[in-house]
Image: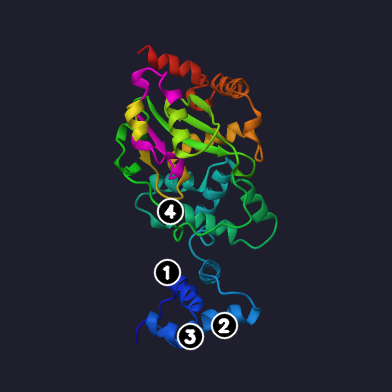
Amino acid sequence: MNKYQRLSNDEREQIVSFLSQGKSLRQIALCLTRNVSTVSREVGHFRKTGTVYKAWLAQVCSEYLSTKRNFGSRIANNPKLHSFIVEKLKLRWSPVQISQELRSRHPNNKCMQASHETIYTYLYMLPKGELKKELIGYLRQKKKLRKNRKQSKDSRGKIPGMISIHERPKEVEDRIIPGHWEGDLIMGKDHKSALGTIVERTTRALILVPLKAKDAKSVRKTFAKELKTLPSQMKRSMTYDRGKEMAEHKLFTKETKMQVFFCDPHSPWQRGTNENTNMLIRDFFPKQTDFSKFTRKEIKYVQKLLNERPRKTLGFKTPKEKFKELLLR
């Protein structure tokens, strides 16, 4: 007897499509090579509540039930692992950092390892109460719900000619050689305005880029203009997410001599320096800020303040001091 396999996210997407075409449950089951009772149960849960069948919601419900059934495993039943994770959360470590540290400390002990998704799942599947509230409170983004990252798809499409972050030279990851930057846009109120942020990985030096528009051409020209003033040894590469504002990356590379590397979809930790700096910037420009109301002088003043702030990661030197120090080598 074949082992039963749960419906995949792709199959659920196909069910949505077939239902919209008016196919019967039996026809859908034939198309999916599934038992009709499987499809009937899947759709029946929604019909009973009078709601439209949604693939993403069905997937979340399925994963929740699966997690609930297996909740007693790994973190919950391993006091040592649980204590380590809670200790690091209290130090404001992210689940990604905790996962990497566990792997580093216990390379041959799977019982003392947990992926960042496992940690997130544990936190969000905790029963409502003070413990759940406390632990989620240590996360930088204190969301009430978390979407499944494994099933996420990049709905923005692909940018032609992208070079993956996995092809980036090792020197960038090690922060040994300066001149490698990370870039992003901070969106303003109703996504009608934006502010460009570019951070150097080794020195944490920040460039804030005032933008009149956030289309690919405007971003490429404005970013290139800001970076052209840098010494050549400080212009090596740029790591960016898959935002369409960097669609003209080839022209950008031609103008600046900086190769652009693109992160994996939904992987902000691959631009960790930029993400952390964006949080500092939000102290000055909270969400719902209309960047069009700020002058270039006002924006550059914030840049100056952040570049002249001592950083623990730099031995309490400022990004400005560290940048100058590396230029004199």
**Circle 4 is placed at which residue position?**
113
**Residue that appears at 63% across and 45% down:** 190
Dot 4 or dot 1: first in sequence order is 1
| Residue 172 at x, y percent in the picture | 35, 32
Question: Which circle's residue, 4 or 3, is located before the other in the chain?
Answer: 3
Residue tagged by mark 3? 25
Q: Given the image, on which type of amino acid does mark 1 rest?
A: Asp
Q: Are marks 2 and 1 in contact (CB under 8 Å)?
A: no
Q: Mark 1 sits on what residue?
A: 10
Which circle's residue, 1 or 3, is located before the other in the chain? 1
Please indicate whether residue 86 sits to the left or right of residue 74 in the image.
right
Q: Where is residue 319 drawn, in percent x and y?
A: 49, 21
Q: Are marks 4 and 1 in contact (CB under 8 Å)?
A: no
Residue drawn at 40 percent across, 80 percent down: 4
Q: Which residues are magenta?
A: 225-250
Q: Nearer the viewer, residue 3 or 17?
A: 17
Element type at mark 2: helix
Q: Amino acid at mark 4?
A: Gln
239 vs 314: above or below: below
Q: Nearer the viewer, mark 3 or mark 2?
A: 3
Mark 1 Cα shell of 10 Å, populated few (<14), some (14-19), many (≥20)? few
Secondary structure at badge 1 equals helix
- Pointer 4 with pointer 3, Cβ within 8 A: no
Which mark is first along the chain, 1 or 2? Answer: 1
